[in-house]
Image (cartoon, rainbow, N blue to C red):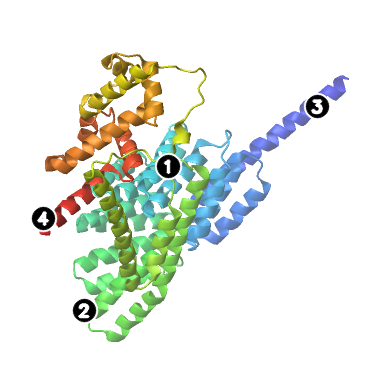
């Protein structure tokens, strides 16, 4: 019996030991390959796939997908890279290390920012920061703060906040020094680019050179990051009109084993500009032809990446981001159609507006005939099954109807506190009688009755007093007795078929036409 217990204990201890060894091995391999992916993505992908095949922990699975995604991005497979990144996110669990989770979130933030979806990018960036707060390792913390600052800088850049981004990146540069050289190079490149945007050319040059020195220290001179540094230096010297020096750096950028298509396209364009200044027609044509072939590839990639990012959002958070598919596909289609289709779209848009305007004129014609606008429902839809018969004397009914008519001629219904009890008191009756008489003689419930009076009242004011056409919707709502802007808008559209803003626009147009006639 004692022997059996001892064997069980030893078995459990051995299993736990193997588990710990696996975690340590994958963590060490992961950190090492975070740097090597920029120089040898193919080898990194192979290592990550091996880890993935043998992984049993959530962290190892997430780390493997993250490395594969980074390798695919460096190799130019942007769409596959996004999909693999989503696989990493989909494998999150309670056991996922905050370091791995923060890397994935910060990378998602950067991808969304580069695709112009800054609100979503900001959300993922905050998720990364939240995970970063739980990291205890100084080295891991430094890496995460670096990538968070990098992704954040793309969000700020899109909102013309380059100076704020620069301050944050310089703070990270100064306070988180325990990062691998490759990450130092990345942050130097980004700081240099922001200096370039701010026309600080000398500062940009200094940081691009610092990036190259960091890459040299780590033996990653031929990485994709070096291509960005060389391209940046080419831009700096082109701005200074040092054409030969600029040309040298652009050529070095293009000689890198891995260079993303966007940087390659910009480099070709810059070289074309140089050769144009040097009257070298053959070389100018050479790089222009390269870009003619490259441009459709970039457009397709950007479009497909954006589509993948949006699809993921639809699956993960339907209530956060709802995309109008018709408008989206129309936008995509407009990118590849001739300019003539734009005019066709404009024609149909005007045609739709004209139809709405015709419907508006019919509505105004009814108003001018003193016809009250009503909620579009059928009588039987508001009829409720009486639970108990209410018998009201004919004289009482007639009296209440007369008092209701007087009430309708007044403006008492514009009181936001008006309700059935208040109206019954004003008409010297009770709420049951008032409710029943409105239901049977007005063919509607109390709320519909009051709302129709209010909408007809405010429409009359807009028609007779042009000042009301310039008031805010919130003021119109208050003037007609509605307690909120939103309630007024919903009721207004329900009765007229137009939002208040649409109605005002059409009414202004109608008045202008009448003056011209």
C-alpha gap between disc 2 and disc 1: 44 Å
| Residue appearing at x 23%, y 51% in the figure | 506
- Front-lying residue, 417 or 93: 417
Compared with 363, 16 (above or below) is above
Element under disc 3: helix
- Front-lying residue, 264 or 250: 264
Q: Which residue is mark 3?
A: 8
Report which quarter residue 210 is drawn in: bottom left
C-alpha gap between disc 3 and disc 4: 97 Å
Label 1: how many residues lie within 10 Å, few (<14), some (14-19) or many (20+)? Answer: many
| Residue appearing at x 39%, y 32% in the figure | 443
C-alpha gap between disc 3 and disc 1: 45 Å
Say whether disc 4 or disc 2 marks the residue closer to the N-terminus. 2
Say whether disc 1 or disc 4 marks the residue closer to the N-terminus. 1
Q: Is residue 221 left or right of residue 503?
A: right
Element under disc 1: helix
Say whether disc 3 or disc 1 marks the residue closer to the N-terminus. 3
C-alpha gap between disc 3 and disc 2: 80 Å
Report which quarter residue 238 is drawn in: bottom left
The label number, if any, that marks residue 104 in the structure image:
none
Say whether disc 3 or disc 2 marks the residue closer to the N-terminus. 3
The label number, if any, that marks residue 277 in the structure image:
2
Mark 3 vs mark 2, foreground winner is: 2
Q: Which residue is mark 4?
A: 515
Mark 2 vs mark 1, foreground winner is: 1
The label number, if any, that marks residue 124 in the structure image:
1
């Amino acid at each position: 019996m004692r022997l059996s217990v001892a064997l069980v204990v030893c078995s459990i201890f051995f299993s736990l030991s193997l588990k710990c060894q696996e975690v340590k091995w994958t963590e060490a391999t992961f950190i090492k390959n975070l740097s090597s992916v920029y120089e040898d993505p193919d080898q990194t992908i192979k290592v990550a796939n091996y880890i993935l095949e043998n992984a049993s922990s959530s962290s190892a699975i997430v780390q493997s997908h993250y490395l594969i995604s980074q390798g695919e991005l460096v190799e130019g497979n942007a769409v596959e890279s996004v999909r693999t990144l989503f696989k990493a996110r989909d494998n999150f669990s309670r056991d996922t290390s905050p370091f791995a989770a923060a890397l994935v979130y910060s990378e998602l933030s950067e991808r969304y920012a580069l695709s112009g979806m800054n609100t979503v990018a900001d959300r993922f960036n905050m998720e990364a920061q939240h995970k970063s707060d739980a990291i205890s390792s100084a080295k891991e913390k430094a890496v995460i703060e670096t990538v968070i600052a990098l992704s954040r800088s793309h969000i700020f850049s899109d909102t013309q906040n380059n100076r704020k981004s620069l301050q944050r990146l310089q703070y990270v540069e100064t306070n988180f020094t325990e990062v691998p050289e490759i990450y130092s190079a990345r942050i130097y490149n980004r700081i240099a680019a922001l200096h370039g945007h701010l026309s600080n050319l000398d500062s940009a040059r200094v940081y691009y050179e610092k990036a190259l020195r960091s890459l040299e220290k780590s033996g990653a001179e031929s990485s994709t990051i070096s291509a960005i540094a060389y391209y940046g230096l080419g831009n700096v010297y082109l701005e200074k009109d040092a054409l030969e020096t600029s040309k040298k750096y652009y050529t070095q950028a293009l000689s890198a084993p891995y260079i993303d298509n966007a940087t390659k396209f910009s480099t070709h364009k810059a070289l074309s500009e140089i050769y144009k200044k040097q009257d070298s027609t053959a070389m100018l044509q050479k790089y222009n032809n390269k870009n003619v072939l490259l441009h459709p590839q970039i457009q397709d990639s950007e479009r497909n990446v954006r589509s993948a990012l949006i699809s993921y959002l639809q699956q993960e958070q339907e209530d956060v981001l709802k995309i109008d598919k018709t408008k989206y596909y129309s936008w995509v289609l407009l990118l590849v159609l001739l300019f003539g289709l734009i005019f066709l779209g404009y024609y149909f848009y005007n045609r739709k507006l004209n139809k709405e305007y015709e419907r508006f004129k019919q509505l105004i014609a009814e108003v001018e005939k003193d016809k009250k606008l009503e909620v579009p429902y059928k009588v039987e839809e508001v009829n409720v099954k009486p639970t108990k018969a209410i018998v009201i004397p004919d004289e009482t009914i007639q009296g209440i109807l007369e008092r209701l008519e007087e009430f309708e001629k007044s403006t008492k219904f514009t009181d936001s506190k008006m309700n059935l009890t208040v109206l019954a008191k004003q008409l010297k009756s009770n709420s049951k009688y008032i409710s029943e008489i409105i239901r049977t003689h007005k063919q509607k419930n109390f709320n519909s009755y009051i709302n129709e009076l209010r909408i007809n009242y405010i429409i009359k004011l807009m028609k007779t007093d042009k000042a009301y056409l310039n008031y805010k919707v919130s003021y119109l709502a208050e003037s007609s007795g509605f307690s909120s802007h939103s309630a007024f808008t919903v009721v207004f559209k329900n009765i007229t078929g137009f939002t208040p803003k649409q109605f005002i626009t059409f009414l202004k147009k109608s008045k202008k036409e009448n003056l011209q006639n």
